[in-house]
Structures are given as C-alpha cells and as structure tokens.
Amino acid sequence: MKNPEQKTIQTETEAEIDVERKEALEQAEAENEVTLTKERDHITKLFLELGIDIKAVHPNIVRKLRLLNEKTKKFFEDEEQALHLARMLFRYYEEKLPDGVFTEEEKRIVLVGTIFTDIGKTGPRDATPEQEELILSIFNVESKKPGQAETLSLQTYLQINFPDKYNNMIEKISVISGLSPEMTMRQFWNMHSQWTLDIISGDGVPSEAIAAAAAHHLLEGVNPEEIVGKDGRFTRYFGANISFDRPEKLIIILDKYYAARRRSDATHEEAIKFVSNKIKSNKWFSKDKEFEELLNNLDAMLLNDGGV
C-alpha cells in the first residue's frame, strides 16, 4: 500500500502533467487559429487583387478553397505560380508583341479562372465534409504512373494506395453520386471538371471565368455538360465570354506546364514538349495556331528571362 507521501507526490505529478497537456493544447489551438487567420487573410487578399468581391461569393466556395489549401498544402503555391507566369506573359506581350497584347477582360478571365480550376477536387457541390476529405485524399496521391489512369479501377487504386482504409473508403465511395468502385481512375480524375462547374456556377464567381475554369481539361476531351460547342462557342451564358479562345487556352497551357515542372520534376524543355504533345494529340486542336503561338511565346519568354 502506498504511503500518504507517495500518493501526494503522485497526485501533484499528475496535476502538473494535466497542466502541461492543457497548456500544450491551448498553444496548439492558438497556432491553428493563427494559421486559419492567415489563410483567411490570404484568400481575402487574393480575391481583392483579382477584383473579386468575397462577400458576393457563396461561403461554400470560399470554404472549399480553404479546405483545398489545408489538405493539399500546395494549393496557393501552385495557383500563385500559375498567376505569376500569366502576368509575366502579359508583360512579355506588351513589351515584345504589342500587336497581340491581352485585353483587360482576357487577363481577368485567365487570372480568375486559374484560381478556381481545382476547386472540384473537393468533390461534389453538396458533398459532406467527410466525403470532401475522402475525395481529396485520393487526389493527393502523387505517385501516378503513366498509363495507370486508363487501366486501373478506382477500387484497385484504393487497394494499392490505402490498404488499411480500403473497406471503409469503398463503402463511402459507393454512396457518392457519380462515383463507383468499378470506374477507371481517368474517369474519377476527370470528374473534378464537372464538380468545378457545379460548385462555382451562379454563386458570385465572375461568370466570364466559370467556363474557363471548368474547361481546363478540354485537351483530354473533358467537356462538362458540353459547355464548349463544336464551333468553339459556349453553349451556356457566361457573361461577355462567348467562346473558348485565348484566355482558356492559356489557362490550360499554364496548368499543364506547371504540373509537369512540379509533379513530374520535368525540366523547362521537357515541360514544353509535354504540353506540345498534349496539344498535338488532340484532333480538334492539333493544328490550332493560337495554342501554338501561346506555347511558343511562353517558351521564348522563360528562356529569355533565364528563370527556367
């Protein structure tokens, strides 16, 4: 039996541990609040820079952007790098190609559209928080081998990458509209364009940028709700933006280029070739002069800048 002194010492020690745990928890909560505040300020600042009224944008859209950044860790880094390249190219045209300068409306479509291209990776517009995190966790797997998307089913992919969580994930996937365990990974990944269109339509995002964001995988044949007609004109109303042209093409090029540089660790030359091959492999755009000109000028600008 413990004597009173031992019991007192033990009680005091436990009390000290409890105090330390409480202090650690309070510190963690404070640090988390600082992080969240910075993210909120970051989004507010970004929207302000792009001329987007954050108060007019549906809170669910802002929340999904924050979730995307929180779970991917590189969302803002990726998007801001794309914005930086776009602004560099705008200046390049002004200085070197004055006859082809981007109009203010074109610039706005590129910059605003770029911010929302990946919001669909949070899942459907009405996804539950649990479903959002599930879908994001699948998109966050970086080890995507060439050809894997076309041959692997979603269920096999989950078995490989989430063996301990497989049964639970399959059960939850099965109740999400539009998803099935048997679908290929290509079909799964392509879903985020449709989800992007659903999430940002009619909720305060500038209408001209909505189609630009949703059509960013058109080279792969992903055309949600057939918003791009065979003649290149949009089949729905998107404000003053009536057709798929230079701004949308630049968003695609920047998205593909930066993805190759960061995710595949490609050199500048390899990334340019990767984008070029993507364009040439599409029967509708293989001879598109606007795509070719934009890519060639991006290449020339970066080589001239020396930042490759």
Image (spheres, rainbow, N blue to C red):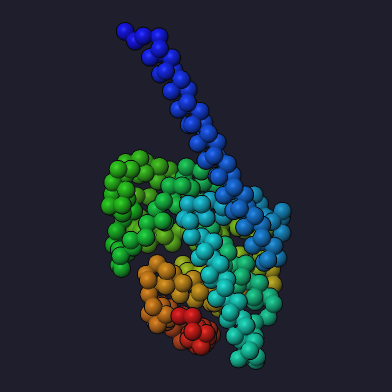
At 61% from the left and 86% from the top, the residue drawn is: 93
Quadrant location of the N terminus in the rendered image: top left
Tell me, yes or no, if residue 231 can be seen here.
Answer: yes
List x then y, in percent, for residue 29.
55, 39
Q: Is residue 109 left or right of residue 216?
A: right
> Residue pushed farthest front?
5
Along the viewing direction, whichever of 110 and 46 lies nearer the viewer:
46
In the picture shown, does residue 202 fall above or below 26? below
Tell me, yes or no, if residue 277 can be seen here.
Answer: no
Along the viewing direction, whichever of 243 and 254 lies nearer the viewer:
254
In the picture shown, does residue 29 fall above or below 239? above
List x then y, in percent, for residue 262.
42, 69
- The total of numbered circles placed on residues is 0
Which quarter of the picture shows residue 164? Answer: top left
Along the viewing direction, whichever of 306 and 225 lies nearer the viewer:
306
List x then y, in percent, for residue 3.
36, 9
At 34% from the left and 10% from the top, the residue drawn is: 2
Which quarter of the picture shows residue 268? Answer: bottom left
Q: Is residue 56 left or right of residue 14?
A: right
At 53% from the left and 58% from the top, the residue drawn is: 119
In the picture shown, does residue 184 fall above or below 11? below
Quadrant location of the C terminus in the rendered image: bottom left
